Amino acid sequence: MSADQGKVMALDEAIRTYVKDGCHISIGGFTVSRNPMAGVYEIIRQRIRDIHCYAHSNGTGVDELVGGGCISKLEIAYGGNAKQAPTCIRFKAAIQRGEIQFEDYTNYQMALRFHAGAMGVPFIATRSSFGTDIVNKWGFSKDVRKKDPKIPDNKLVVLDSPFGNWCNTSKVILVPAITPDVTIIHVQKADKFGTCRMMGLTYADVDQAKAARNVIVTCEELVESKELRAEPEYNQIPFIHVSAVVPVPFGAYPTACYRYYDYDPQYLNQHSVFAKNDKLYREYLDKFIFGVKDHQGLLELVGKVQLEKIKADPRTGYATGLDRK
Amino acid sequence: MSADQGKVMALDEAIRTYVKDGCHISIGGFTVSRNPMAGVYEIIRQRIRDIHCYAHSNGTGVDELVGGGCISKLEIAYGGNAKQAPTCIRFKAAIQRGEIQFEDYTNYQMALRFHAGAMGVPFIATRSSFGTDIVNKWGFSKDVRKKDPKIPDNKLVVLDSPFGNWCNTSKVILVPAITPDVTIIHVQKADKFGTCRMMGLTYADVDQAKAARNVIVTCEELVESKELRAEPEYNQIPFIHVSAVVPVPFGAYPTACYRYYDYDPQYLNQHSVFAKNDKLYREYLDKFIFGVKDHQGLLELVGKVQLEKIKADPRTGYATGLDRK
Amino acid sequence: MNYTLREMMTIMAAREICDGDIVFCGTGISLVAAMAAKYITAPNSIIFFETGAIDSELEEIPMSVADPRVMYSAASNGGLLEAFATMQNRITGDRVIGILGAAQIDKYGNLNSTAIGDYFKPVTRFSGSGGACDVASFVPRYLVFMQHEKRKFPKKVDYLTSPGYLDGPGTREKAGLMPGGPTAVITNLGMMRFDEKTKEMYLAHYYPGTTPQKILENMEFDVDISRATEATPPTENELKILRERVDPHKLIL
Amino acid sequence: MNYTLREMMTIMAAREICDGDIVFCGTGISLVAAMAAKYITAPNSIIFFETGAIDSELEEIPMSVADPRVMYSAASNGGLLEAFATMQNRITGDRVIGILGAAQIDKYGNLNSTAIGDYFKPVTRFSGSGGACDVASFVPRYLVFMQHEKRKFPKKVDYLTSPGYLDGPGTREKAGLMPGGPTAVITNLGMMRFDEKTKEMYLAHYYPGTTPQKILENMEFDVDISRATEATPPTENELKILRERVDPHKLIL
């Protein structure tokens, strides 16, 4: 890779290079915001299979990966997605039909697991989920765990605190670290070396990136390093964590990208109709994903008029007054 | 407290209200940057005694608190302060003379301890300090710890990981949480409710604040909430964590406040001459701390000419070309 | 004055929020209740979201806790780690009131939002915990919105997603949880509370037009109805706030 | 060409930095070495500070790792948590080379920067670990700057602040530390390395004008001198870089 080009790659090349059959991945964003949808659709397009996916509430993206048949194992806290899909539809179907293996955590636990991975420690403590089935029911059995070196031996461990009752806490639940092979995030701005500037909420993106062996960043705008370095305190991810940078305008579409565009209620509504029916959903994949060359192709199908509607108002950062029924 | 005034207080009132004899405190900043010096000097001026202080590398501020006779117990990672005092001078003297009790940690461990406190868990794991005297030598004995409910029963605990060799880590060191009675930080901007905007490095200030029962924020500028809320992602501390807000221009002086002013090498050089001699140091305290009414009084002693010299260059954020010999 | 059941439920919840509370919110009716409370009982309450937004200026109703609408003019936009630490940490956590929903609730207020039937091969799969279990684990008080149907008030939840009072008095603490638990269950028929001693659900209020007996018919387990009184319907002012200020475009109500 | 011993030491360290390394830096001579390396052997090395600044544009030499000069035009300004995680985390940590200093070092490269004499009633108290013990615990390679004096190379350090090879082969790993340890000790007389098998210090290079024997006289313990060769003095180009580009105002050198 030349210094001139930094880590800039085409998206299909980045996905092909880092996302392999059977690999462990996580994606950024939360429900209908800043999901790396261009990356997700490219994974589906390349028909990558048998992915082990870690998610907190990575709604739209994870549901499409499940629907696209890419995921075989899923560790997740929340498979819901705003009004259009209170339970993600393909996720729901896949579990009810026994098509994927899954294991449930809480959102905080998943965030802590990425945090532990980013920190390089095997676990972190929390006081969440004592006495619940989150602790009692394991999606992956002891046996499966023992055999697979990429799954920790225990789901969660209850530990008596070795500091007595320090902080009025006599026991804690330890959650094991996650270190994905690849994390894919979509950000507002990045430079060619991978330094990232996110705007609005960051969810767990920073730890998801730092915990991963390789990070693919898609960005709305590829900007000069100089611009980002004028205020380094607002760059959440320095370039040392990043493997590939791909400029993809509307790369989070149909989810929102704060200060750039809103989520598209029309697309999401239509999508939930498709998703509820296997045949319609196959047709949807054929048309919107497989039927186009890349994300630009999908955007062209959607059309400029629709994209214009969701453009962010500079004052609020979202499409003020957008019809969201 | 009226809604109009928010949490704004005079500094002497804020210190008197929250910092008591025998209380546990931490201060923000690192060596010669963004120490809450106005707050530190006010603590000395009010002759508060028997403070238990938690520090990572909170150089200038902690050394003055030690020199001012305010601290009786100190948990610390680094008592050094740039060129003028590779080992903080009053800290060094106090330890060599047996005047304070102390316990050594590493910088990461202290940062993690504040992090655990902010998270509300009793401990957090690290792989730092195995096999060293950081683990073996305890500043506070088992006995002292048992008797004092505000000190955890163990300094550090080595634990075999209950996740086997997950993350190639078979054991970890657990560091206990810190929850100070009060944390004092100095920030560039705050609103009257306590929402804070820091510029440049944040060190461990955010966790130090969130771990504390009460937080006193001194700020260079008291700004309208509207200004800070225009970019909420860059406000590191929301108001819910803060008890008192005190506008104090040059409140970090003689340490630096990025984008506002540099550290003052002349003051620090002179200070280190004073600090090396008990008599001179007493005279220094009498003149610069006890001899003035408040921080403004100290700044007047220093003089406008000197303050002008350390003013930050808008391009670099520090005093470009400042004579620092 | 006419009002819908959803309006009634929203107001019942809003009245539970005290001034100065930090309100952990989801979306939908729970958010509308929190927004309404700021105009009614709790002008200084603070709405915050598990995604990390605190005290957002909600000019429009967000449809998800990650909706860009929660980011606008917040005091701070952080991430999940910061948001949940705010609840797990006792300093701020003790000031938080949560508002949750679920598919099932038992007499001790334990919630299921994960699956109906066998966990591994469920008849119906739901979204799962999200932050619900975290909130229920950490905060001293939380409200639960439910639809009053027999299958939703079973003797035992199919999957225990979020802890209520577990198996009764003292069992939260014994399990390792912080003290706390649900303080009210608000349904389309009435409001349940939990007995201070037994930690069992009892009927506190039934809405005008229904009866305690009708409510019992919609639950698999029995609850004490001896303390039940008729709920006060939404006032004109409360309805005005809901309809004109909080949800003028009827996105939720 | 004339050069000072501090210039010699700086260049010896700079030569140890490989292109692409992430260099954990303190201030003073270690920082000057890292800055020089970027002009000599390692244009793509990245200087980073425990305070959280990564790849700062060092127009002026910072006097502390918290100096506002490290914040200027960095890739990112974070905090201590982020900085140390970068080293503890194996993904980025494996790329880090540390540069440390100490008051004492033993034959296994264990460092004391805390106290001389009894820990509780020391003859001389130093600053303490700061981030040194963290770096020495986490990263695969680190350099140590020392003054070559007998009392600074004792048989046993008075306080073990930062782990070297502890008690020899395998003891780091047994104790729970990551593999790693010091790779070179750079003094005012020469450079020591550590035997791959025994993990004991040996003399690798002595500076022009001194002898292995003289070096031994300045240490409490013996080291193997059989492999020692004379060090290559700084080249004209290296000196030019130090004097004109890195430290033109002679703040450090």
Image (tube, coloured by chain):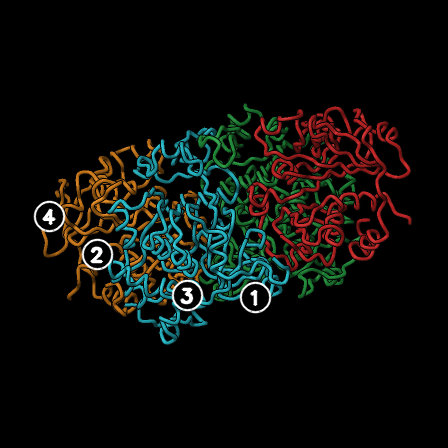
Chain colours: A cyan, B green, C orange, D red
Q: Is residue B97 visible?
A: no
Q: Residues within 10 Å of mark 2 (few under 14, many from 20)?
A: many
Say which amino acid is labelled 2.
Met
- First of labels 4, 2 by sequence position: 2
Q: Chain of mark 1?
A: A
- Which residue is denoted by mark 2 in the rendering? C9
The residue under the point 60% across, 59% down is: A6
Expressed as whole percent of the image width and height from the top left, the position of residue C182 reads 27, 44
Secondary structure of the residue carrying tag 2 is helix
Amino acid type indicated by mark 1: Val
Position of residue D99 relative to residue D150, above or below, is below
For the N terminus of chain A, which image quadrant? Answer: bottom right
- Residue C212 has which mark? 4
Which residue position holds label 1?
A: A223
Q: Do the dots labelled 3 and 1 sit on one chain?
A: yes
- Circle 1 sits in a helix, a strand or a loop, which is it? loop
State which mark lies toward you, 3 or 2: 3
10 Å neighbourhood of mark 3: few (<14), some, or many (≥20)? Answer: few
